[in-house]
Amino acid sequence: MKKIDIHHHLLEETSYVDNLLRTMDRLEIEQTGLIGLGPLFSKMFVKGQYDGSCADDSAVEKVMKKHPDRFFGLGYVRLGVDSVRKVDELHDRGFAGLKFHIPKTRYDAEDNFPVYEKAQLYGMPCLFHTGIVKMPYPCPGEKISSFNMDCIHLEAVAQEFPVLKIIIAHLGVQNYLTALTLIRLFGNIYADLSGTTPGWRANISPDDWKRLLWFPDAHKKIIFGTDVHYSEIASNINIYGEIAAAAGWNDEMKRNMYYNNISQLLQQTKRRSYERSQN
């Protein structure tokens, strides 16, 4: 079954993109959304030989231009540090969406609203990290707080920006019940189930998933994303399959999760990204 992976980090590992492409071909992943978080996340997830690079927006942009049919970019914006001008810049460089992580302020802080307003104007899907964060290295002075990234703060964002395309990464992790309520009640909020294998999903049984994904359109609100090293993608797909089976989803519902939902969100921005990569 064909897939689009909305949540994958470019890693600073020798031959990583080549290995990722082979994995994508084997697992029927047509396209992957690449994210580069920069120096604060140096060597994150690296299992092989460190290649000495920095996985940032510029590195992602190079991969996008080299493989425009396989990769699109989610530009990294650190709220409370980056200004709204960075959204303009990322859009002009052909990035299809935005990734928010380790903000200096809560997601619903009004100082962040100009960023969301511009993303809404451009139709750029926004992937918000949620859950507890363990950085690759200690970061004293960076004011990193998972409270700022609690998914409940996205309620106010969705209310203020009703057509902003919001994706809750990791289904809120420890606050998955809140995340599920948000995606059920708000038409512009979705969630991926990404994470380490099995990670936060280890304590949720098949019976739990049947109970949690009870609402009729749940299959239209869950999006496929991995957020792991390429060697763990197959295991993540198995987990998604088990969750879909527990929820009683048929093939068309699974196609929504794996492909259709994110394809619809990206329809405009992917086209712009491809056109810009050719210029």
Image (spheres, helix red, strand yellow):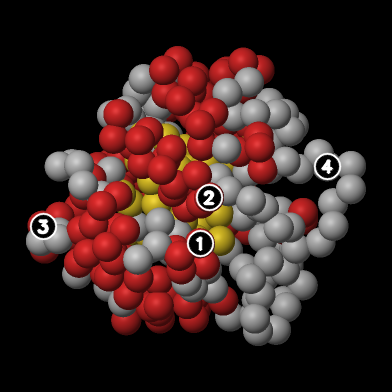
Location of residue 108 in the rendering, given as x and y in whole percent from the top left corner: 58, 23
Calculate the distance from the C-alpha at mark 2 to the C-alpha at mark 3: 29 Å
Side (left or right) of 48 relative to 71: right
Which residue was labeled with disc 1? 200
The answer to whether marks 2 and 1 mark residues whose Cβ atoms lie closer than 8 Å is yes
The number of discs equals 4
Measuring 27% from the left and 62% from the top, which residue is drawn there? Answer: 207
Calculate the distance from the C-alpha at mark 4 to the C-alpha at mark 1: 25 Å
Which residue was labeled with disc 2? 174
Q: Residues within 10 Å of mark 2 (few under 14, many from 20)?
A: some
Calculate the distance from the C-alpha at mark 2 to the C-alpha at mark 1: 8 Å
Amino acid type of the residue that numbered disc 2 sits on in the rendered structure:
Gln
Amino acid type of the residue that numbered disc 4 sits on in the rendered structure:
Glu
Q: Earlier in the sequence, mark 1 or mark 3?
A: 1
Location of residue 172 in the rendering, given as x and y in whole percent from the top left corner: 49, 46
Which residue was labeled with disc 3? 252
Amino acid type of the residue that numbered disc 1 sits on in the rendered structure:
Trp
Which residue was labeled with disc 4? 142
- Please identify, in this view, whether the residue under mark 2 or under mark 3 is nearer the observer: 2
Q: Earlier in the sequence, mark 4 or mark 1?
A: 4
